Image: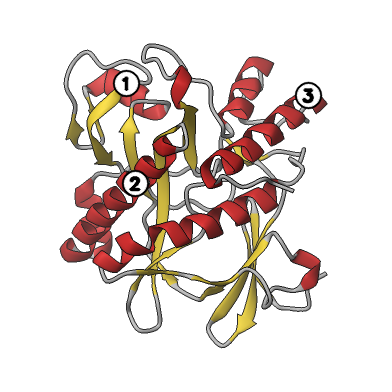
């Protein structure tokens, strides 16, 4: 037990009041898919999410600086309670903005389905002839709402972002999201990974400074594909939770009833993908 007031419990994380405008974010081993938290945890997942987020926050500082922005991480070491060491971050308390800032550099998942229906993703028209796994001419900003646990994120267009946060802030979010994605994609490709898409969350600090929050560029929030096997025209092998989504789809689960337990081999294979993503991106061994 952590001797701090619990502020919120999300699909994967618990958030605690750490005083003095600080929060403690604790990443569990829970995994979610299709808006459900699955009953089977993935060992070490919380540690991977935390360690990878900490690493990415460091890499992205130059991009944030260019926009006069910052990130919320204060510490993942000494200031973290011993009982959650390795899977918790001490962060700034933010007023979170009501938008999931999604960047896509490749066509995949729901983006493919929308493109096949409309020739666009949100309000961004795309050229004809793209297929699952195609690289887009330029990365695109495809935001969504931020849903509560058990609810579904809803796709929104840029005009809706403007209505939620105002025109200047909306444009700032779009430009910063795309800049962070481009830098993340460059770093990932150097490590042999295609960053197909990802999502960011932003808030405002007590001083009103735009701040990157939550987790960043993890296998929970991103699609990571092995660059060596990338080939447009089909679903791609991945180092993320798409493996779990695919198993759930093949199991016949209706996405409405309580989700099934994951078999041991699926759990082990999912853990391996998360650890591989961490090791390839950072060049460090996961212990």
Name the quadrant containing residue 99: bottom left
On screen, residue 136 versus residue 235, left or right, reads left
Residue 111 lies left or right of residue 285; in this view the side is left
11 or 186: which is nearer to us?
A: 186
Q: Secondary structure at mark 1?
A: loop
Report the Cα–Cα distance between label 3 and label 2. 32 Å
Q: CA distance from mark 2 to mark 1?
A: 17 Å
Are there few (<14), some (14-19), or many (20+) residues within 10 Å of tag 1?
some
Q: Give residue 103's mark.
A: none
Question: In what element is the residue under mark 2?
Answer: helix
First in sequence: mark 2 or mark 1?
1
Residue under label 2, please give it: 181
Q: Could you tell me which residue is drawn at 48 percent across and 55 percent down?
A: 56
Q: Is residue 106 visible?
A: yes
Q: Going by the picture, which residue comes out furthest to the bottom? A: 20
Side (left or right) of 280 relative to 67: right
Q: Where is mark 1, residue-wise?
A: 134
- Lower sequence index among marks 3 and 1: 1
The residue drawn where x is 59% and y is 34% is 241
Q: CB of mark 2 within 8 Å of CB of mark 1?
A: no
Asked which quadrant contains residue 104, the reply is: top left
Residue 139 falls left or right of residue 144: left
Q: Is residue 143 visible?
A: no
- Which residue is labeled 3 in the image? 265
């Amino acid at each position: 037990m952590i001797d701090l007031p619990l502020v919120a419990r999300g699909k994967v994380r618990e958030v605690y009041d750490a005083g003095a405008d600080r929060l403690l974010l604790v990443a569990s081993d829970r995994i979610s898919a299709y808006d459900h938290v699955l009953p089977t945890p993935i060992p070490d997942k919380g540690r991977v999410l935390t360690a990878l987020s900490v690493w990415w926050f460091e890499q992205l500082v130059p991009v944030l600086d260019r926009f006069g922005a910052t990130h919320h991480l204060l510490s993942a070491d000494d200031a973290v309670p011993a009982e959650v060491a390795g899977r918790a971050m001490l962060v700034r308390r933010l007023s979170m903005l009501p938008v999931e800032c999604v960047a896509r550099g490749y066509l995949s998942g729901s983006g493919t389905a929308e493109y096949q229906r409309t020739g666009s993703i949100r309000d961004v028209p795309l050229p004809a002839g793209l297929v699952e796994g195609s690289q887009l001419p330029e990365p695109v900003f495809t935001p969504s709402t931020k849903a509560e646990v058990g609810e579904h994120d809803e796709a929104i267009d840029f005009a809706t972002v403007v209505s939620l946060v105002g025109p200047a802030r909306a444009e700032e979010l779009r430009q910063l999201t795309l800049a962070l994605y481009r830098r993340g994609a460059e770093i990932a490709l150097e490590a042999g990974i295609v960053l197909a898409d990802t999502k960011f969350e932003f808030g405002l600090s007590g001083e009103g400074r735009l701040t990157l929050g939550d987790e960043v560029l993890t296998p929970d929030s991103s699609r990571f594909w092995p660059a060596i096997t990338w080939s447009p025209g089909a679903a791609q092998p991945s180092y993320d939770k798409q493996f779990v989504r695919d198993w759930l789809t093949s199991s016949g689960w209706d996405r409405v009833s309580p989700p099934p337990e994951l078999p041991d081999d699926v759990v082990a294979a999912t853990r391996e993908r998360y650890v591989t993503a961490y090791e390839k991106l950072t060049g460090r061994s996961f212990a």
